[in-house]
Amino acid sequence: MNLPAGLPAWAYILVSAMILAAQVVTALWIDRKGDERDTATRGEITNNHKTPLRDDLDEKNRRTLDAIDSLRETVEALRDDVNGEFATVNRRITTTEQNVVELRHEVNDLRNQRQ
C-alpha cells in the first residue's frame, strides 16, 4: 500500500497502527478458535466425563456392530425383494412366451381352415 507523498508523520503512524491492530485481532481470533478445538480434543483424549474410557469404547463398538447388523438385514431384505421380483418377471416372461406360442398355433390353424 502506497500512501500519497507529503503526508504528516502521524498519518503514517496511524496507518501502521491500524494494520498492526488488524493483525493482532486476527491472530487472537485464530488462537481462540484453536483453543476451542484443542479443548474439545483434550476432552476426548483425557476422557474427562463420568463414563470410563473402556465403557465408551465398548459402547461405540456395540453401536457400530449394531449398525452393521442392521445394514446386513436391510441388504438381505432387499436381496429377497429383488429375487422375488426376478421370479415374478421370469414367470411373466414364461407366460407371455406360452401365450405367443398358442397364438401362433391358433393363427396357423385359422390359416389352414381358410385354405
Image (cartoon, rainbow, N blue to C red):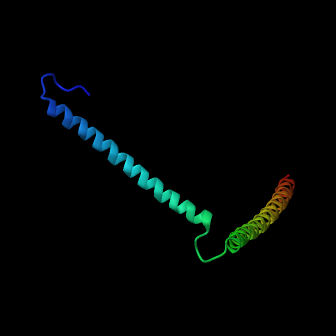
Q: Residue at x 28, y 38 (%)?
A: 19
Residue at image x 84%, y 59%? 106
Locate residue 69 relative to residue 20 in the image: left or right: right
Is 29 located above or below residue 75 in the figure?
Answer: above
Residue 18 shown left or right of residue 48 in the figure:
left
In the image, residue 93 lies at what x, y percent? Answer: 80, 60
Q: List x then y, in percent, for residue 30.
A: 41, 49
Residue 62, image x, y percentages: 72, 72
The residue located at (61%, 69%) in the rendering is 47
Q: Position of residue 16 (x, y in %)?
A: 25, 35
Image mark count = 0
Q: Residue at x 86, y 57 (%)?
A: 105
Task: Determine the residue located farthest toward the top in the rendered image.
Answer: 5
Question: Considering depth in this image, is 114 or 12 the residue closer to the camera?
Answer: 12
In this rendering, is residue 80 above or below 4?
below
Front residue of this view, candidates 75 and 10: 10
Which quadrant of the view contains residue 1? top left
